[in-house]
Amino acid sequence: MPEKPNKLRVSLISGVVIGLVSAIPGLNLINCCCCAGIILGGVLAVYLYKQEHTEGAPPMESSDGLILGVTTGVVSAFCTTVLNLFIMSLFGDVASEFMRSFTEQILEQVNLPPETIDQLRSQIDASMAEATTFMGVMKELLFNLLIHPLFAMLGGLIGYSIFKPKKPVEFNPTPGR
């Protein structure tokens, strides 16, 4: 009897895709909608796994979707952190500059006392400066290691419910009427 396909290969491919979606500035805004990019990566993992499934192998189970989601999420957490560092080293902190300009536009629109606006600006600057330190990167990695596996697992279970083997429907007409 043939064995089930390798989950690690599928998890690596899907994890890199999630990492790219989560790290590329602008594209990472997809994750603002309930971590949609991460969930879709979990669905992608199950889809790729089903494509590698051969006839005669044991059927795909919900535990396969769960395992695929978690391992894909772990891979994507590391991939996202590494890609963020790479993008930061090439282009500077693009995301922080975008957020700084976005925040400035919002602060110009609201009626707050000047001392409150100055305090908000200093807190935002301090938070963005911390993000580029070693501890900031480690915090980002830890956060990613919590969030990515959780939402990719949810995507894996959704993917399983979409791509699970369909059972044939039995039709038993009642005789007589």
Image (cartoon, helix red, strand yellow):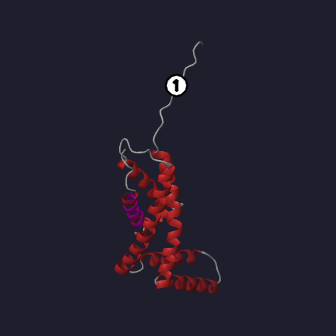
Residue 150: tell me if it is visible: yes
The residue that label 1 is drawn on is 171
Residue 32: x %, y % from top left: 51, 64
Q: Is residue 112 left or right of residue 16?
A: right
Q: Is residue 1 above or below residue 174?
A: below
Tell me if residue 148 is in the magenta stretch: no
Task: Give the residue at the far right of this rendering.
Answer: 113
Question: From the viewer's perspective, is 130 left or right of 112?
Answer: left
Q: Nearer the viewer, residue 61 or 150?
A: 61
Residue placed at 50% from the left, 31% from the top?
169
Residue 10 in picture, x, y percent from top left: 38, 57
Query: Percent from the top left, x then y, of residue 104?
Result: 52, 78
Q: Where are the magenta residues, as a range?
A: 10-19
Q: Dividing the picture into quarters, in which one does residue 94 lie? A: bottom left
Q: For the point 59% across and 82% down, which residue is it?
A: 120
- Give the percent coordinates (x, y) of residue 88: 39, 79
Secondary structure category for the residue under label 1: loop
Which residue occupies the extreme front position in the image? 1
| Residue at 47% over, 64% down | 73
Quarter in which the N terminus is drawn: top left
Main structural element of the magenta stretch: helix, strand or loop?
Answer: helix
**Which residue is found at the position 50% from the left and 46% from the top?**
161
Q: In screen coordinates, is 118 left or right of 56?
A: right
> What's the amino acid at mark 1?
Phe
Figure check: 141 above or below 118: above
- Crowd rating for badge 1 (residues with CA inside 10 Å; few <14, some 14–19, many 20+): few
Depth check, front residue: 67 or 151: 67
